Amino acid sequence: MQAKRAIVTGGSTGIGVAICRALLAQGLDVICLSRREAGLKDARLRSISVDLADAEATYRVARELAASQPATTIVHNAGAIREKALDQVERSDVETLARLHLIAPLALVQANLAAMRAAQYGRIVLISTRAVQGLAKRTAYASTKAGMLGLARTWALELGPAGITVNVVAPGPIEDTEMFDQVLPPGHPTREKLAQSIPVRRLGTPADVARAVAFFTDPEAAFVTGQTLYVCGGTSVGALTL
């Protein structure tokens, strides 16, 4: 049963909802951890409210779940941007996003590691961003999301012998998400300009990201670990200007 349970963070909207839907389609029971209720209803989906930027609350929920409902698939999707020019960035911006982007997945993986090792199976996917390659006004966001790449490569080396894979999906501009809409609201003239600057000439969708996640969480994807897959329409190849 452990191999049939997944934890998804940030499943209340956008990419998180699409990921939950994809994992349910894979036959997994899903536990959604987010500040708000999960964005879809399903008999096999349980929603737990928690602020993942609160390290103590995250560790507490992680331990409680691991004691009663351990998971062998973890997808850490929850994130925040805090768009600011360098001279406006505050220490609290970096500290908060470090807890959300780095400490939260650490807590979840550590809590469920014994179950994964016992099962000799695990799938860990971290949702980063194309912005790790550089994007203006993303000091806190890009730096902490970049840390996910280091986590994945390190954990892949440590956990590979136990049948546990660790990979990263790094989305580019994805429409129909709260974070993207905060930066470029619907109807903003820059949205179409941005879409046309992307090699595939469109913005991404949550389903585009969920398909990449579903590849990494598939039990058959056992020979791919420590990798970063950019789901960005080709923007990781060249420059991206918002």
Image (cartoon, grey):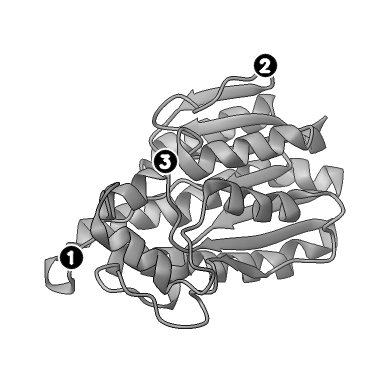
* Sequence-wise first label, 3 or 2: 2
**Residue beneath the point at 51% across and 74% down:** 199
Which mark lies nearer to you, 1 or 2?
2
Q: Which mark is residue 89?
A: 1
Answer whether residue 59 is visible to the viewer in this image. yes
Quickly name the residue at label 2.
Answer: 43
Q: Is residue 103 left or right of residue 181?
A: right
User: Residue at 22% across / 56% down in the picture?
Assistant: 92
Q: Earlier in the sequence, mark 1 or mark 2?
A: 2
Task: Kindly identify the amino acid type of the residue bearing the numbered disc 1.
Answer: Val
Q: Residue furthest bottom?
A: 238
Task: Answer with left or right where residue 88 lies relative to residue 12.
Answer: left
Give the amino acid type for the residue marked by disc 2 in the picture: Ala
Element assignment for label 1: loop
- Tell me if residue 31 comes above or below residue 16 in the rendering: above
Q: Is residue 218 above or below residue 67?
A: below
Q: Quadrant of residue 162?
A: bottom right
Q: CA distance from mark 1 to mark 3?
A: 21 Å
Task: Please provide percent x and percent y for residue 186.
Answer: 30, 46
Above or below 195: residue 176? above
The answer to whether residue 133 is left or right of residue 225 is: left
- Residue 18, position as x, y percentages in the image: 58, 40
The image quadrant where one finds the N terminus is top right
**Residue receiving disc 3:** 52
Report the quarter where the C terminus lies: bottom left
Amino acid residing under circle 3: Leu
Q: Is the residue 57 above or below the residue 200 in the image?
A: above
Q: Between 33 and 157, which is closer to the camera in this rendering?
A: 33
